[in-house]
Amino acid sequence: MHGRIARICTSFIDVPGKIAVAIYFAGCSLRCKDCQNQELWDKESGEKKSIHDVIKQINEHPLAESVVFLGGEPTDQVEFLKELCKKIKNKEKVLYTGREFEALPQELLESLNMIICGPYRSELHVGGWPASSNQRVLTKKGNTWNHQNT
């Protein structure tokens, strides 16, 4: 199985207080107004990569405690994302999505530890984390998702 990935890099800001491997998915069908990553809207902005290739790049970041999926819109490639999550071991998995939590597939939710969800809305920009006040941060404890106050 292959996905379209724009870049993979180390992140110090996407998971507060943790070092993460950031995986930027190419392509976005949501196209939020004033998106900070408009260059990733086109699926062709990324390279075709296998799950094996992505796991190899994750493993090249030995200090990372987390893997964060951003974009573009990672859930536009939901089958690839679900399979990738299944293969990632011993790291927290965090998803940034413009979709609402309730619209995400259960199989994906089972693989994640944290979700930042909701479309970016520039008129609700807060200059902090998350980027706009309508976005929700949910963390999983056991099998229960809880809203995190930011």
Image: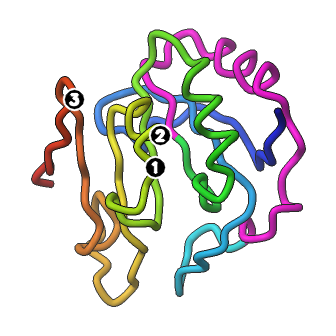
Q: Give the amino acid type for the residue marked by disc 2 in the picture.
A: Leu
Alpha-carbon distance for marks 3 and 1?
A: 15 Å
User: Can residue 106 be seen at all in this image of the molecule?
Assistant: yes
Label disc, if present, on residue 108 of the rendered structure = 2
Helix, strand or loop at mark 2: helix
Q: Is residue 42 magenta?
A: yes
The tag earlier along the polypeptide, 3 or 1, is: 1
Q: Give the amino acid type for the residue marked by disc 1 in the picture.
A: Pro
The residue wearing badge 1 is 105
User: Can residue 13 be seen at all in this image of the molecule?
Assistant: no
Task: Identify the residue at horizontal 17%, vertical 28% (top origin).
Answer: 141
Residue range of the region highlighted in magenta in the rendering: 39-68
Asked if marks 1 and 2 touch (Cβ < 8 Å), the reply is yes
Label disc, if present, on residue 143 of the rendered structure = 3
Q: Residue 103's spot in the image, x, y percent?
A: 41, 62
Task: Identify the residue at horizontal 23%, vertical 34% (top origin).
Answer: 140
